[in-house]
Image: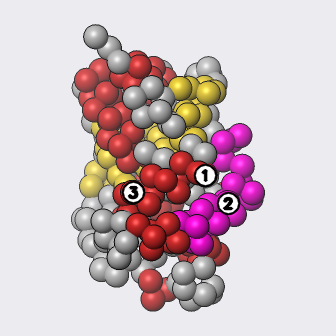
Amino acid sequence: MTTIRQQVLGEVADRILALRLRHPARVGIDGHSAAGKTTLADELAAALRAKTARPVLRVTIDHFKRHVDRRTRYPPGSPESYYFEMFDVDAIRDELLVPLGPGGSRRYRSQIMDFSGLTPIDSGVHVAPDDAILVADGGFLQKPVLSRHWDLRIYLHIELAEVLRRGTIRDQAWMDSAEAAAVRYSTYYIPGEELYLAEIRPAERADIVIDNHDFDAPRIMRGLPNQGH
């Protein structure tokens, strides 16, 4: 029996496959920390592979962080540092999105940095065919320097209280305690993401908005009909 989650994933996969492009389809899954972006991206990639023989590329934007030594404009640990300095948006654009876009070389990198932002990683250069599908997940994907380079923008919605609850449960494993994780979310992640919400209003700009509060029963809040390209 098909679950609600599988049904939603299938509908999103069909929307992606309906895109008519002359270059790889670049799909970005955006949203709060702990919204379930990586899990949904993995599952969406699997759903796409089950429906098509086209190559599906999976990239996590957490592998495009700026080295911590280059985050110098704002105080370390501040919401501003997180929002403005965490990710190397120029590298995301130039090493990943532009090469896969119109007139691009199709030569792209899948990662440049480890999750900690301390150790550079050379993924090597990959070559994508024109009919490939990129499924990427990460935060702040609709910043102006990136937004126009996505062919489909998906935003996962959960309430801030749920961000705090999920994030505390998830991150206490690598932090000193649940209390330390809660403080980190309350003073760093959530305020930084509120800067993004205020400046960009990503849920309003996304092509598809999914309410992911109930993991087993996500709900498509908005999905514009495909207009073709």
Q: Nearer the viewer, residue 47 or 54?
A: 47
> Which residue does the image show at 60% across and 62% down from the upper left?
190
Numbered label attached to residue 194: 2
Name the kind of residue labelled 2 in the image: Glu
* Residue 102 can be seen in this image: no
* Residue 118 can be seen in this image: yes
Q: Nearer the viewer, mark 3 or mark 1?
A: 3
Calculate the distance from the C-alpha at mark 2 to the C-alpha at mark 1. 9 Å
Calculate the distance from the C-alpha at mark 3 to the C-alpha at mark 2. 21 Å
Q: Is the magenta stretch mostly helix, strand or loop?
A: helix
Name the kind of residue labelled 3 in the image: Ile
Mark 2 vs 1, N-terminal side? 1
What residue sits right under mark 3 in the picture? 169
Residue 203 position by quadrant: top right
Residue 215 locus on image (x, y percent)? 42, 34
Please report contact status of discs 2 and 1: CB closer than 8 Å, yes or no: yes
> Which residue does the image show at 64% across and 75% down from the upper left?
80
Name of the residue lying farthest toward the top:
1
Residue 51 locus on image (x, y percent)? 30, 20
Residue 2 locus on image (x, y percent)? 32, 14
Q: Which of marks 3 and 2 is in front?
A: 3
